[in-house]
Amino acid sequence: MSEIEKWMAQHVPVAVNEVCSLADLRAHLLFYQADEAVVTCNVETLPTIEIIGKNKKEKKPSFSEAVAAFEMHLKGTLDQCDAKPTSAMVSIQSKWPFQFNELLLFQQVLTAHLSFAPLILMGFLDEKKIDISCIMGVGVKRTTQGQRLAFDLDDTLTSYAAFFSSLSKQNCDPDSFKLIISTRYEPDTSSCQQAVYDKELAEIKGMGIDYDKLVHAWCPFDLAGKLFPCGNDYDWLKRFIWQKAFYCRLHHIDIFYEDQQRNIDLFKKYAPEIEVVHVNNGGGHES
């Protein structure tokens, strides 16, 4: 088993398999490399025992404590690297929930150390600990060719089918990629789910859009609970936009086309390195 497969077996949260494949994760990690070389670092933060009088009390670790310990270990790992990382995945698995603002602060810390935003995987743990792990690609860097584009489906592609059909067909360099992100959702128990999916595919084909992959950013709430150990039931919009940003990062997207301003505002906050084009349904496109 290679170091990549070993890391994935130990640190990719099980729920992540429901929104992307291990092959996609591996492709993300090695995308900028001409050969395969990785380094890893991992920190487990466990509860501590507090003695109050004659009583012992278990104190759970805070997310900030776990981040501080991991940041120190990551800095040491990077100092020992001969090559600068070209890509990275960070896994956060926690017994206890944390907040979205803590996640965004951690992302900023990671970006400062790596000089790019890593792909972040999250999941709940049954064990009493916070596990933060990172795998970084450090192989010989290769030159990439072609733009990698992502399109929102409803009120973006559906509003300007001719324009996006033409744009998608122009983008055909070796590393080019076209991703469609849908937010249509039918529960797993619904008999309409497959019908909704088939309708999407038929619509996309009818619009003449050339694409490589169709994904769904709207997760069932039980799956969202496993994937996002941060926030609460009222944070559905944050989870929904974070999932869009996750798919764009997973596929190294350069430009994302989206119609809703509130979605764009959050997307820019979560993934500021990706260019967002506002598809203005009043007419025209705005960067």
Image: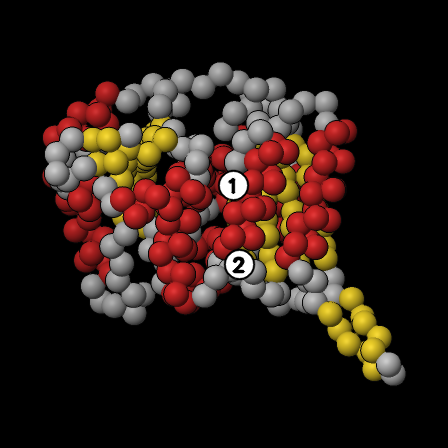
Q: Which residue is mark 1?
A: 119
Q: Quadrant of the C terminus?
A: top left
Left or right of residue 273: residue 130: right
Q: Secondary structure at mark 1?
A: strand
**Callout 2: 10 Å neighbours few (<14), some, many (20+)?**
few
CA separation, marks 2 and 1?
A: 18 Å
Question: Eyeballing the image, is 103 above or below 89?
Answer: below
Q: Quadrant of residue 219?
A: bottom left
Q: Is residue 14 visible?
A: no
Whole-percent x, y for residue 138 in the image? 63, 27
Residue situated in front as seen by the camera: 225 or 1: 225
Residue occupied by mark 2 = 99
User: Which is more toward the observer, 91 or 282?
Assistant: 282
- Quarter of the image for residue 264 reads top left
Question: What residue type is disc 1 on?
Answer: Leu
- Indicate how the structure is coloured in the image: secondary structure
- Whole-percent x and y of residue 194? 23, 58
Q: Are marks 2 and 1 in contact (CB under 8 Å)?
A: no
Q: Residue at x 24, y 31 (%)?
A: 286
Number of marks in the image?
2
- Closer-to-camera residue (43/99): 99
**Does 43 sit left or right of 162 as displayed?**
right
Q: Give the position of the N terminus as an image quadrant.
A: top right
Residue at image x 49%, y 35%? Answer: 28
Please tell me which residue is depicted at 71% across the width and 31% down the height of the picture. Answer: 78
Against 121, is 178 above or below? above
Does label 2 or label 1 sit earlier along the sequence? 2
